[in-house]
Image: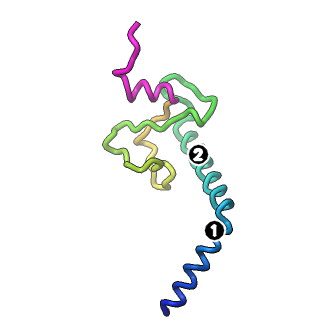
């Protein structure tokens, strides 16, 4: 395959992506929302510590063993994400688990 054809395909693809960027971004956001919802349901749908289950935006994936945590911000989007390495916690409980040294003493 001549280099000219490869370059032309690259340019054509680049133009298509730039014309369809909003649609692509909306599709990715919809996929992420579905994927996150599916994983939350697999983990029981509620915080394992307090039972909160009103809004999935307030639920976090807490890694049981920090050594298994990948450095990627959203490794839960990957299809090979292992749900057995995490528990579902609400934001408040997640903060308490991650930072016990900040507990307010009464």
Left or right position of 55 against 76: right
Instruction: Give the quadrant of residue 52.
Output: top right
Q: In the rendered structure, which segment of residues is drawn in magenta?
A: 90-106
Query: Residue 68, how many percent across, how many down?
Result: 34, 45
Instruction: Give the quadrant of residue 13.
Output: bottom right
The residue that appears at 51% across and 30% down in the rendered structure is: 91
Tell whether position 19 is magenta: no
Q: Which mark is residue 38?
A: 2
Label 2 Cα neighbours within 10 Å, binned few <14 / some 14-19 / many ≥20: few
Pair 2/1: label in front: 1
Q: For the residue labelled by badge 2, is the local secondary structure a helix, a strand or a loop? A: helix
Q: CA distance from mark 2 to mark 1?
A: 30 Å
Q: Nearer the viewer, residue 45 or 26?
A: 26
Check the picture and name the quadrant holding the C terminus.
top left
Q: For the residue labelled by badge 1, is the local secondary structure a helix, a strand or a loop? A: helix
Q: Which mark is residue 71?
A: none
Left or right position of 95 against 29: left
The residue that appears at 45% across and 50% down in the rendered structure is: 75
Query: Residue 86, how many percent across, how many down?
Result: 43, 39
Q: In the picture shown, does residue 105 fall above or below 56?
A: above
The residue that appears at 55% across and 40% down in the rendered structure is: 40
The residue that appears at 52% across and 85% down in the rendered structure is: 6
Question: Mostly what secondary structure, the magenta segment?
Answer: helix
Query: Residue 51, how many percent across, how many down?
Result: 55, 24
Q: Which mark is residue 18?
A: 1
Query: Residue 59, how many percent across, how many down?
Result: 54, 34
Left or right position of 7 against 19: left
Q: Nearer the viewer, residue 34 or 21?
A: 21
Say whether disc 2 or disc 1 marks the residue closer to the N-terminus. 1
């Amino acid at each position: 395959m001549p280099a000219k054809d490869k370059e032309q395909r690259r340019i054509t693809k680049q133009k298509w992506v730039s014309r369809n960027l909003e649609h692509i971004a909306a599709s990715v956001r919809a996929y992420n929302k579905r994927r996150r919802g599916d994983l939350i349901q697999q983990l029981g749908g509620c915080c394992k510590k307090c039972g909160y289950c009103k809004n999935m935006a307030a639920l976090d994936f807490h890694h049981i063993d920090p050594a298994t945590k990948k450095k990627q911000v959203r490794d839960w989007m990957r299809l090979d994400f292992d749900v057995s390495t995490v528990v579902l916690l609400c934001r408040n409980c997640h903060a308490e688990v991650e930072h016990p040294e900040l507990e307010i003493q009464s």
